[in-house]
Image (cartoon, helix red, strand yellow):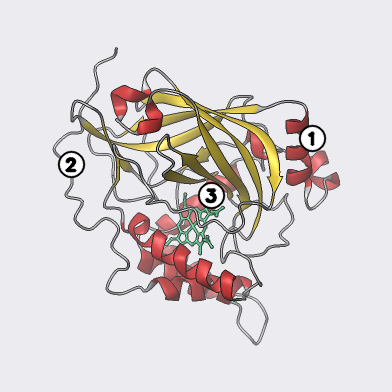
């Protein structure tokens, strides 16, 4: 067994703030209003990642997992997973070739029937450092009623004052649009604290790697694919057999920011392979009613003090409430 590197004293934080419902400045409701202000409110749909498709499979832990965390699914038999693949943003009719982040939300059913969620996107960075910055990012993109479009000058001014909010867009631009949900890499972006049976803790970030490799759409394919090609592709590929993702945790090094999801950690950081997700079948819209909760965590995995992570459950609950009401 490899020796586990311990988080430096720089990175071990009090968890008192984790899970706080909101910062003093930003209410979860304001963030949902911000999303609805851009995309509209669509009956029964999520305020973000409105378009999606559900799938089922299993997670099998790797031998290395238990040295990282005592989470119940990091040892023993495989556990079932419910997955929702999605397109970023609140437009339920967004064409699948649009260059936005994709989502992969995973619910693990643990041996005692409790659940743990992992909610990831297809870029290694988020577009805001704090809930307040996320809100300003959304507000500045709301269409001007006079033109029906966001004010480009205001967006440019905001980007100049907040350069970290441009990094996700730049990353997406620099990478091809994926040709399948099953060839897309997914990242949890926020850091979590992993603690093993010996009480050793490290901060890490989940990285989910498609076993068949990362493959983008060619320009020619992009011209001919249907608006719903990602769902059609998923059905076709899984009809031919299960597809795997390798699940890793990237370990924070000295000086890596634990609470800032706009900063990518160096690719040279150790990655621990913690298991394999096998996606076996499409289950239509059967997970639509679920609220995947980034802070539904098992023993052995705790949140970092990232304020974006802390506000997410309350934002998602507000979105759930609205989609249940309409
Ligand atoms: C302040 C920051 C954020 C806001 C305002 C926000 C907002 C939302 C909302 C309103 C939903 C719909 C929830 C529901 O109705 O169940 C959602 C879903 C989602 N978010 Fe976020 N989010 C934020 C941060 C993040 C981050 C950092 C990630 C990166 C992993 C992320 C990934 C996702 C994914 C993948 C879904 C779809 C989950 C599903 O399929 O149910 N979000 N987000």
Among the 4 quarters of the image, the one containing residue 57: top right
- Image vertical order of residue 230 relative to residue 4, above or below: below
Q: Earlier in the sequence, mark 1 or mark 3?
A: 3
Determine whether the residue tagged by mark 3 lies in a helix, strand or loop.
Answer: helix
Q: Which mark is residue 12?
A: 2
Sort mark 2 into few (<14), some (14-19) or many (20+) by Cα contacts within 10 Å. Answer: some
Q: Are marks 3 and 2 in contact (CB under 8 Å)?
A: no
Position of 71 relative to 313 (above/below)? above
Residue at 78% over, 51% down = 228
Asked if the beta carbon under badge 1 is closer than 8 A to the nearest atom of ligand 1, the reply is no
How far apart, in angstroms, are the residues tagged by discs 1 and 2? Answer: 45 Å
Residues 69 and 209: in front is 69
Residue 64 drawn at (x, y percent): 36, 19
Choose mark 1 or mark 3, whichever is in front: 1
User: Few, some or many C-alpha atoms within 10 Å of disc 1 (few <14, some 14-19, many ≥20)?
Assistant: few
Vertical order, 25 against 266 (above or below): below
Disc 3 to disc 2, C-alpha distance:
31 Å
Answer few, some or many: residues within 10 Å of disc 3's Cα (few below 14, many 20 plus, some between 14 and 19). few
Q: Secondary structure at mark 1?
A: helix
On the image, the x and y values in percent for residue 146 come to 65, 87
**Circles 1 and 2: CB distance less than 8 Å?**
no
- Residue 236's disc is 1
From the viewer's perspective, is 258 left or right of 13? right
Q: Secondary structure at mark 2?
A: loop
- Residue reaching furthest front? 112
Residue behind mark 3: 170
Tell me which label, 3 or 2, sits earlier in the chain: 2
Residue in the image at 56% along x and 62% along y: 48
């Amino acid at each position: 067994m490899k020796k586990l590197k311990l988080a430096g004293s720089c990175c071990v934080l009090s968890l008192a703030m984790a899970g706080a419902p909101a910062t003093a400045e930003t209410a979860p409701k304001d963030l949902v209003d911000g999303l609805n202000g851009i995309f509209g409110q669509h009956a029964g749909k999520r305020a973000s990642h409105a378009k999606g498709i559900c799938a089922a499979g299993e997670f099998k832990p790797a031998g290395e997992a238990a040295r990282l965390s005592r989470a119940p699914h990091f040892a023993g038999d495989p556990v079932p997973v419910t997955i929702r693949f999605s397109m970023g943003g609140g437009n339920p009719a967004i064409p699948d070739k649009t260059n936005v982040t994709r989502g992969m939300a995973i619910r693990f059913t643990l041996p005692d029937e409790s659940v743990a969620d992992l909610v990831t996107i297809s870029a290694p960075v988020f577009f805001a450092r704090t809930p307040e910055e996320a809100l300003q990012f959304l507000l500045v993109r709301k269409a001007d009623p006079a033109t029906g479009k966001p004010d480009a000058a205001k967006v440019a001014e905001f980007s100049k004052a907040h350069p970290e909010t441009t990094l996700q867009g730049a990353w997406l631009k620099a990478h091809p649009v994926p040709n399948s949900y099953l060839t897309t890499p997914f990242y949890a972006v926020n850091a979590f604290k992993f603690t093993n049976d010996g009480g050793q803790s490290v901060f890490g970030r989940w990285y989910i790697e498609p076993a068949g490799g990362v493959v983008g759409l060619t320009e020619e394919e992009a011209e001919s694919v249907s608006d719903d090609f990602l769902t059609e592709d998923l059905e076709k590929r899984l009809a031919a057999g299960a597809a795997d993702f390798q699940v890793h945790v990237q370990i924070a090094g000295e000086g890596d920011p634990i609470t800032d999801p706009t900063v990518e950690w160096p690719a040279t950081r150790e990655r621990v392979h913690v298991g394999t997700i096998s996606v076996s079948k499409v289950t239509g819209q059967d997970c639509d009613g679920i609220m995947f909760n980034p802070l539904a965590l098992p023993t052995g995995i705790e949140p970092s003090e990232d304020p974006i992570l802390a506000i997410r459950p309350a934002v998602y609950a507000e979105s759930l409430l609205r989609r249940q009401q309409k």
